Every structure is written in C-alpha cells, then in structure tokens.
Image (cartoon, rainbow, N blue to C red):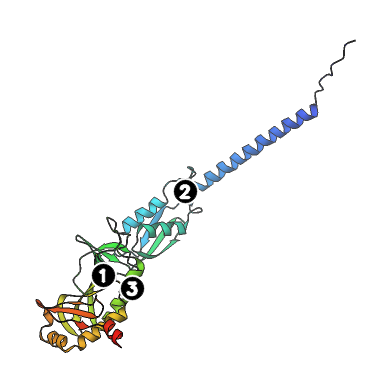
Amino acid sequence: MSEKKPSTVFNKNSEQRRKTRTKWIFAVVFLLLVLVAGAVAFLRKSEFQISSIQVTGTKALDPDEVQQSAERFVSGNYAMVVPRTNVLLFSKDGMAKFLMSKFPGIASLHVSFIQRNVLQVSIAEKSASFVWCDAASCYFVDDTGLIYEESPRFSDGVFLAFTGATLNVLTPPIGSRFVPVPVFQSVLTMVNQLTGYPLEVVGVSFQDSGDIAFRFDELKGVPVNPNAVLMVAKDTTADTVTQDLDLLTADTTFSDDLAAEPSQLQYIDARFDGKIYYKFGTTASSPVASASSASTTQ
C-alpha cells in the first residue's frame, strides 16, 4: 500500500495580507513622492528666490567684484533641484565666510535681507597702516602682517613700509605673509618703542640673514639722511635697542658728528655684542660700548 503525499494548502489570508502590504508600500512611496515634488515646487517659487544683491561700504575694494563673488556663492542648486538662491535655505554665515576668505581686505561683514528678496552685504574694510613692497609692486598689510590689497607706491611717512621676507610669498602675494605673525608683531612693538625714543622709523627691511634694518629719517629730533639705517640682530629686544641708542647718543664723538653733519649719517649697527658701530660719510667711526657690554662689566 503506497503512502499518500500531503496536499499543499493554499492560505488565502496570508496572500491577502501580502497584497495589502504591497498596496500600502506603493501608497506611502507615492505620497512621499508627491510631498517631495510639492516641496521642490514650493521652494522653486520666484517669491522665495534672492532677486538681487547689494554691496555697501567698499572703498578700496571693487563693489562689482564683491557682488559677482556673492552671486557665484548662490549660483547652482541644492541636490540639483532646489536653487541656492532660495531665501529659506540661504546661509548668511556661509556667504560671510566665503567673501572674507575671497577678499582679505575685509575687516568685518554683515549679510542681511533689506527686503524679502533683496540681499545686502555691508562691508567694513581694514584701515591701512602698513605696506609691503617687492621689486615691482606695493601692497597693503594688516596688523598681523597679512598682505590683503595692492597699493600705490607712497612717499616716506605716509605708511610704514616693509621690504624683504623670511617666508615664501605667493605670486600674486595677496593673502600671504612675508614674515611669521609673532615676528611681525615683535617688530611693530620695536618700531613703536623706537618712535617714542625718538627715532622716526619710515621703513623696515628683513634681511636674508634674519637680521632687521630700520630705515629712519630723524634721530633725537635731528633730521638725518633719509636712507640711514639702524641694523639689529633678529633676536634683539626693543629695550636692548633703546639702551644701545642711549649709550650711542651720549657718546661725545657721535653727538658731535651728529650735530655737525647729520645728513652724512649712513648707518648705526647694533648687531654685535659689546659694540655699536656707526658711520658718517665715508669714514667708519670707532665703536661705542653697547648695553650688553655695560651689563657684563657691572
């Protein structure tokens, strides 16, 4: 007697549940597509787009160039469907960071909507105090030593002028530095202290050796050769330099030469421990004891 095979039982309830679940999945997907399409259509409406960008507060910067950069920031689309000009998705901070990285001459920047679709970029530029010049051009420099804008060539005294470099400067140099920030700020401290001395510094040159040459046109109230330089070692402090100048100007020979022929002063060299060297005309004078030698003998 042969064994009977079990027959397959068709479960109508299970099949019905599968069909119902499939219908719900399609319904949910369709609803999501409708919602996404509706949201995209909503976000693409013209009343939600930036229609114009206004730039205010520029002086040295070209407002048209800033405006074009701002327009590039909002060009294109998010996810290839929503315009970046959409006012609801627009990032004020993002534009501010973009423009300040693009234009190093900007000190501060404020982005706001003055109308629903009109964006205003208000700019405050850095105030120029220093310039750095290479063989071909000059550039404005901020108080950290950052080169941020091309400048005309000014006569002495308009801005403190720097030349030379200890860092690799880009070509073009805008956005780069010619010396590290601590070195630049240390030199500024020295310039301020020398000016209070008074020694009127009109230029600073960074030498290949790392030493520094201060070009000055007045010493102790006496106008001198405008190309005269004070040379100091790279690790010299402002206090040491002013002490050396005190000792030098107290020296009878130097003070007599300064009074007799100030326009012939060529240089003061305080780079060497123990001695200060100087030169009037074509003749180098005997060195004067420096502050380092005076402290050593005490």
Q: Residue at x 27, y 73 (%)?
A: 233
- Residue 29's image quarter? top right
Local crowd size for mark 3, using a 10 Å CA cut-off: few (<14), some (14–19), many (≥20): some
Horizontal and vertical percent for residue 26?
65, 34
Q: Amino acid at mark 1?
A: Asp
Can residue 196 be seen from the camera position used here?
Answer: no
Q: Which residue is mark 3?
A: 186
Q: Please indicate whether residue 100 sits to the left or right of residue 131 in the image.
A: right
Relative height, residue 24 to residue 245 (above, below): above
Q: Which residue is mark 2?
A: 46
Indicate the secondary structure of the residue bearing disc 3: helix
Q: Amino acid at mark 3?
A: Ser
Q: Amino acid at mark 2?
A: Ser
Q: Earlier in the sequence, mark 1 or mark 3?
A: 3
Horizontal and vertical percent for residue 98?
41, 56
Label drawn at residue 211? 1
Indicate the secondary structure of the residue bearing disc 2: helix
Q: CA distance from mark 2 to mark 3?
A: 54 Å
Indicate the secondary structure of the residue bearing disc 1: loop
Q: Earlier in the sequence, mark 2 or mark 1?
A: 2
Q: Residue 8 versus residue 289: which sits nearer the camera?
A: 289
Q: Residue at x 55, y 41 (%)?
A: 37
